[in-house]
Image (cartoon, helix red, strand yellow):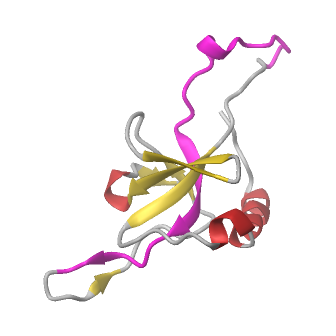
Amino acid sequence: MFRASGSVLRTIARGYSQNAAVKGFTPLFDRVLVERFAPEVKTKGGIMLPEKSQGKVLEAIVVACGPGARAENGSTIPLTVQVGDRVLLPEYGGTKVNMDNKDYVLFREADIMGKFD
């Protein structure tokens, strides 16, 4: 799996906050747009893995967030994730979105399993 340090994640987050493909898109309510990490294509020993044997990557980075869910009284409940956060996704679900030949996935915040520090 992909492991990144805090400084690397901050650099990645700065890049996403300035991403032109996503700047024109804002998710509504409690939806979160994420980009999955690329799957491992090589083992530690240098052996190339075929596409069928690569595992599904469940980690992603948040690219864009909506303002939050609506409460019954009309107030907005803020999201717990922000742009640049590294999150754990469920194995199935989400809506695939393709912008400028890049693949993203749109999830509800409640579907996201957790957030890495």
Which corner quadrant of the image does residue 59 belong to?
top right
Name the side, left or right, on which 116 lies relative to 15: left
Q: Position of residue 107 (x, y in %)?
A: 41, 54
Q: In this picture, is 70 found above or below 42?
A: below
Q: Position of residue 111 (x, y in %)?
A: 34, 51
* Residue 83 part of the magenta segment: no
The residue at the point 78 percent across, 20 percent down is: 42
Q: Position of residue 30 (x, y in %)?
A: 36, 68
Q: In this picture, is 78 found above or below 37?
A: below
The residue at the point 44 percent across, 73 percent down is: 66
Name the side, left or right, on which 76 lies relative to 104: left
Q: Tag count in the figure?
A: 0
Along the viewing direction, whichever of 28 and 72 lies nearer the viewer: 28
- Quarter occupied by the N terminus: top right
The residue at the point 70 percent across, 53 percent down is: 100
Q: Residue furthest left?
A: 72
Name the side, left or right, on which 61 lies relative to 14: left
Which corner quadrant of the image does residue 7 belong to?
bottom right
Q: Residue furthest right?
A: 46
* Residue 46 part of the magenta segment: yes
Q: In this picture, is 79 found above or below 38?
A: below
Q: Which residues are magenta?
A: 44-71
Q: Position of residue 87 (x, y in %)?
A: 52, 52
- Quarter occupied by the C terminus: bottom right
The residue at the point 40 percent across, 73 percent down is: 79
Q: In this picture, is 73 found above or below 83?
A: below
